[in-house]
Image (tube, rainbow, N blue to C red):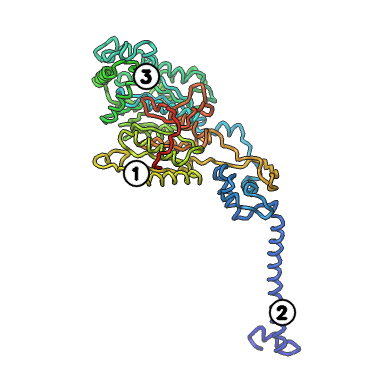
């Protein structure tokens, strides 16, 4: 018997070996062909059915990728006939918006989750990690205390966190004692015992008003809050009195309130020894409420410098032991945490001591890390309605007005339209001959780097289609979506633009920001300029413009409006 199976079968076949072997081979080939035909037929059937369902089904993967990338671009560009998305047509003649509607709808979940009351109460970290934070400013005059406190107030209001600043100088001026009138440099001297007692009384009165604001109407559902005591607080005795009052008020709140928020006291010391920064701060002080009405600015400046010298004689730097909790801590101190932050030369150096795991201090720490006190301007320009020649002329004017001859940076969003516009601006500026900074000026911050053009994706709107898709035929017979891309909520917009705010805060020189919408303008103005106390940032009125210029002053930025500059003849 042969060992080969096929040969063995052929030998047993009654018609002979050769004919039996051929029959077996043909049988095997027929089976393979039938299997291959079945697979091929299934593929053809699937492809035929898929092509028939495509008009009401989903587009191909390539169309999905184009659609989703186009959905992330601005809606005004998608509607433009020259945009690449307008040239994408499916097999039934539907235009790009119909393809976008169907493709994005496939990304939605099958069932929509309902937000429960429990989830809504815990949607914001400040609602869960509830805490009342007291920021006690410490430092000599003209060290940027009011600038820092006002920036924190504007930033926290933008984040919808209750915040309020209590300024001892404003209380003094409200009572009739202003610099150059009822409070000369002698009023701030340590040798003037009566004036010293009066200043001490005003500072502690501000502290009492601050604590009353924190604990007035607090309940279980209240969120975190921030209160700022804006005063010099230059002595250890003053700072300890403030801390004792905070501890006493917190102990009283535990007994009288149902569930008061835990209290955290953070001393924030601003130190400045840079003569250039100090000289600029001294000049800006001539426009505050103490000296803005002075007829002789030179005499007013001399009086202010004497006031600073009087504070220097009694100044005691903040020490770590002042905020470290004692080992024998009583029950009245159990609900009060203490810490301190030191800011040197407007953010060039930062140090944090015992600030803990506070979520409130997390946002403030991020903002403080971006601070600087360099004099500069922020120019806000609408993206639409301006040409490359206008922006180039605006850059020229801003650089000519810069005292240090620094370049001016440009910030825009990352859309095709904005990138194309700023590239035209770059070409116009490159064609002009510009003198380069030489010598010792290159060592100054802001002169070592050339002009920066930043295209930030955080300025791009986040768009998503609405649930209801209404396809109506247009005049040309094609179908287009009747619903436009809905805008994100204002709180989502603020959360998205926090990184843009930090970038603008960190840049050391003047810059031009091309904003794409009025809502983006509201966010930027609410942080850098502020909005009225009786108005929320989302509803604050906007200046007419079209060019809005923010100039650095002692409290933050002052707002100035101007017309769009005409293109220069050389551009």
Q: Quadrant of residue 236?
A: top left
> Residue 352, can we see it?
no
* Labels 1 and 3: the sequence-earlier one: 3
Task: Name the image quarter holding the N terminus.
Answer: bottom right
Residue nearer the viewer, 435 or 342: 435
Closer to us: 96 or 253: 96
Q: Against 40, is 176 above or below?
A: above
Q: Can residue 249 be seen here?
A: yes
In which quadrant is the C terminus drawn?
top left
Residue 278 at x, y = what percent? 28, 27
Count neighbours of disc 1 (C-alpha within 10 A) and say few if under 14, some if 14 to 19, many if 20 or more.
few
Mark 1–mark 3 Cα distance, whole angstroms, equals: 52 Å
**Image position of 295 (left or right of 514):** left
Mark 2–mark 1 CB contact (< 8 Å): no
- Separation (CA) of disc 3 from disc 2: 101 Å
Q: Which residue is mark 1?
A: 450
Given this view, does label 1 or label 3 mark the residue nearer the observer?
1
Disc 3 or 2, which lies upstream in sequence? 2
In primary-sequence order, the first of circles 2 and 1 is 2
Tag on residue 56? none
Which residue does the image show at 39% across and 19% down from the upper left?
167
């Amino acid at each position: 018997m042969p060992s080969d199976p096929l040969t063995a079968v052929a030998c047993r076949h009654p018609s002979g070996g050769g004919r039996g072997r051929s029959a077996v081979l043909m049988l095997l080939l027929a089976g393979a062909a039938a299997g291959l035909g079945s697979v091929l037929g299934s593929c053809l059937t699937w492809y035929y059915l898929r092509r028939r369902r495509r008009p009401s089904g989903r587009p191909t993967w390539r169309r999905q990728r184009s659609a989703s990338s186009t959905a992330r671009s601005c809606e005004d560009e998608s509607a433009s006939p020259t945009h690449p998305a307008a040239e994408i047509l499916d097999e039934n003649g539907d235009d790009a918006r119909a393809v976008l509607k169907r493709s994005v709808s496939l990304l939605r979940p099958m069932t929509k989750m309902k937000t429960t009351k429990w989830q809504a109460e815990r949607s914001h970290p400040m609602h869960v990690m509830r805490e009342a934070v007291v920021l006690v400013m410490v430092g000599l005059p003209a060290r940027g205390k009011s600038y820092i406190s006002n920036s924190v107030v504007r930033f926290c209001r933008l984040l919808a966190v209750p915040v309020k600043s209590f300024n001892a100088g404003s209380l003094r001026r409200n009572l009739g004692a202003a610099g150059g009138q009822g409070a000369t440099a002698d009023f701030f001297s340590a040798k003037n015992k009566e004036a010293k007692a009066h200043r001490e009384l005003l500072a502690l009165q501000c502290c009492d008003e601050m604590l009353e604001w924190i604990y007035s109407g607090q309940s279980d559902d209240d969120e975190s809050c921030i209160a700022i005591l804006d005063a010099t607080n230059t002595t250890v005795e003053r700072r300890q009195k403030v801390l004792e009052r905070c501890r006493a008020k917190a102990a009283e709140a535990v007994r009288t309130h149902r569930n008061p928020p835990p209290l955290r006291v953070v001393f924030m010391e601003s130190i400045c020894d840079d003569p250039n920064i100090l000289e600029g701060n001294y000049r800006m002080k001539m426009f505050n409420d103490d000296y803005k009405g002075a007829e002789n600015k030179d005499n007013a400046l001399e009086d202010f410098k004497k006031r600073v010298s009087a504070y220097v004689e009694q100044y005691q730097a903040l020490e770590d032991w002042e905020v470290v909790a004692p080992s024998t801590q009583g029950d009245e101190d159990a609900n009060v945490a203490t810490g301190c932050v030191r800011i040197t030369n407007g953010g060039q150096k930062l140090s944090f001591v015992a600030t803990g795991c506070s979520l409130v201090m997390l946002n403030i720490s991020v903002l403080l890390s971006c601070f600087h006190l360099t004099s500069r301007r922020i120019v806000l320009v609408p993206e639409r309605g301006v040409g490359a020649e206008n922006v180039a002329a605006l850059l020229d004017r801003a650089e000519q007005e810069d005292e240090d001859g620094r370049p001016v940076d440009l910030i825009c969003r990352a859309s095709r339209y904005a990138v194309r516009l700023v590239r035209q601006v770059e070409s116009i500026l490159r064609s002009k001959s510009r003198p380069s900074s030489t010598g010792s000026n290159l060592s100054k911050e802001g002169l070592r780097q050339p002009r920066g053009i930043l295209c930030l994706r955080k300025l791009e709107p986040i768009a998503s289609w609405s649930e209801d898709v209404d396809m109506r035929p247009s005049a040309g017979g094609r179908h287009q979506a009747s619903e436009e891309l809905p805008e994100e909520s204002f709180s989502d917009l603020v959360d998205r633009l926090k990184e843009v705010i930090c970038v603008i805060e960190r840049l050391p020189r003047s810059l031009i920001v091309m904003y794409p919408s009025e809502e983006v303008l509201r966010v930027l103005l609410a942080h850098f300029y502020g909005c009225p106390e009786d108005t929320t940032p989302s509803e604050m009125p906007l200046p007419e413009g079209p060019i809005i210029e923010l100039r650095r002053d002692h409290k933050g930025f002052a707002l100035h409006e101007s017309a769009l500059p005409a293109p220069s003849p050389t551009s």
